Image (cartoon, helix red, strand yellow):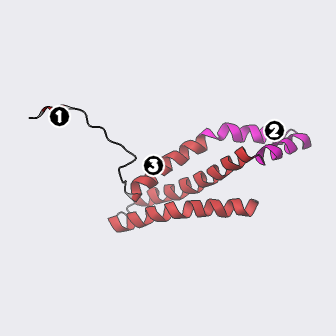
């Protein structure tokens, strides 16, 4: 046995091509984490907006800032992706769309539809 066989091997995860289902699953977990982490921000903005007209104006001004506009876009994608992927996973749990071609197509549909829904939502509130 050569000496190199026992050495650890470096795997660059960014060069590994993952299947579309894996990307959907990773996106589902990431979107759930983002939604969870933004709960304090949402609670702060809600509290600020309920303090009266001045607080509402402050919350609206904060939401119009470029950073929070980016956060809004990220949250719109997170909500759309998490909801669509969650529905996909629930259907798979009851054995609907389990075969490989259907599972691949539904994963691709989630990955395409989520940014489109987020864009549509952001366009409608702009």
Question: Residue drawn 65% across and 40% down?
Answer: 39
Alpha-carbon neighbours of circle 2 within 10 Å: few (<14), some, or many (≥20)? some
Task: Tell me how far mark 3 sits from mark 1, CA to CA.
Answer: 33 Å
Alpha-carbon neighbours of circle 1 within 10 Å: few (<14), some, or many (≥20)? few
> Label 3 belongs to which residue?
26
Label 3: element kind: helix
Task: Tell me how far mark 2 sits from mark 3, CA to CA.
Answer: 34 Å
**What stretch of residues is rendered in magenta?**
37-65
Label 1: element kind: helix
The image shows residue 96 at horizontal and vertical percentages of 40, 65
Residue 99 in sight in this render: no
Would you say the magenta stretch is mainly helix, strand or loop?
helix
Q: Give the number of the disc on residue 48.
A: 2
- The answer to whether the residue labelled 2 contacts the one labelled 3, judged by CB atoms less than 8 Å apart, is no
Label 2: element kind: helix
Question: Residue drawn 52% across and 64% down?
Answer: 112
> Label 1 belongs to which residue?
4
Relative to 93, 62 lies left or right: right
Relative to 98, 31 lies left or right: right
Camera-side residue of 38 and 61:
61
Relative to 99, 88 lies left or right: right
């Amino acid at each position: 046995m050569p000496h190199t066989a026992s050495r650890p091997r470096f795997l660059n995860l960014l060069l590994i091509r993952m299947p579309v289902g894996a990307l959907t699953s990773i996106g589902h977990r990431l979107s759930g984490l983002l939604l969870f982490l933004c709960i304090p921000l949402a609670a702060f903005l809600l509290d600020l907006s309920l303090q009266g007209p001045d607080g509402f104006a402050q919350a609206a001004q904060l939401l119009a800032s470029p950073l929070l506009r980016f956060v809004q876009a990220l949250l719109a994608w997170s909500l759309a992706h998490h909801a669509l992927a969650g529905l996909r996973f629930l259907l798979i749990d009851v054995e609907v769309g389990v075969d490989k071609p259907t599972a691949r197509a539904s994963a691709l549909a989630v990955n395409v539809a989520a940014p489109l829904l987020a864009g549509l939502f952001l366009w409608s509130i702009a």
